[in-house]
Image (cartoon, grey):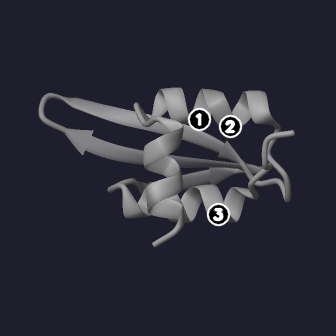
Amino acid sequence: MPRLYSARVIIKVLERNGFSVVSQKGSHIKLQKKLAGQTLTVIVPNHKEVAIGTFSSILKQAQMDRKTFLKLFKK
């Protein structure tokens, strides 16, 4: 079974990749990263364990693959 990550860990890795926390509404935290001509927006639910499907969606929104995530996670 794949490992489940907490919102805290996911946000820390996204921040290492250039994202910054913009706002929070309820239990959802919004992060953004500005690129040339576009802004990537990712919403992370503030849960102890983020479901694997939600985690995959977060990576897709962040235009990041699991390999990059794991590399930044281990720093």
Name the residue tied to disc 2.
Answer: 55
Residue at x-position 52% and y-position 68%: 74
Which numbered dot is residue 58? 1
Compute the Cα span from label 3 to label 2: 11 Å
**Residue 40 locus on image (x, y percent):** 37, 34
Question: Under tag 1, what secondary structure?
Answer: helix
Compute the Cα span from label 1 to label 2: 5 Å
The answer to whether residue 22 of the structure is visible from this angle is no
35 shown above or below 14: above
Q: Nearer the viewer, residue 43 or 18?
A: 18
**Residue 61 locus on image (x, y percent):** 49, 29
64 shown above or below 10: above
Q: Are marks 1 and 2 in contact (CB under 8 Å)?
A: yes
Compute the Cα span from label 1 to label 3: 13 Å
Residue at x-position 53% and y-position 63%: 73
Which amino acid type is shown beneath numbered disc 2? Answer: Phe
Q: Are marks 1 and 3 in contact (CB under 8 Å)?
A: no
Which amino acid type is shown beneath numbered disc 1? Answer: Ile
- For the C terminus, which image quadrant? bottom left
- For the N terminus, which image quadrant? top right
Which amino acid type is shown beneath numbered disc 3? Answer: Val
Question: Under tag 3, what secondary structure?
Answer: helix
Q: Quadrant of residue 44?
A: top right
Question: Under tag 2, what secondary structure?
Answer: helix
Name the residue tied to disc 3.
Answer: 9
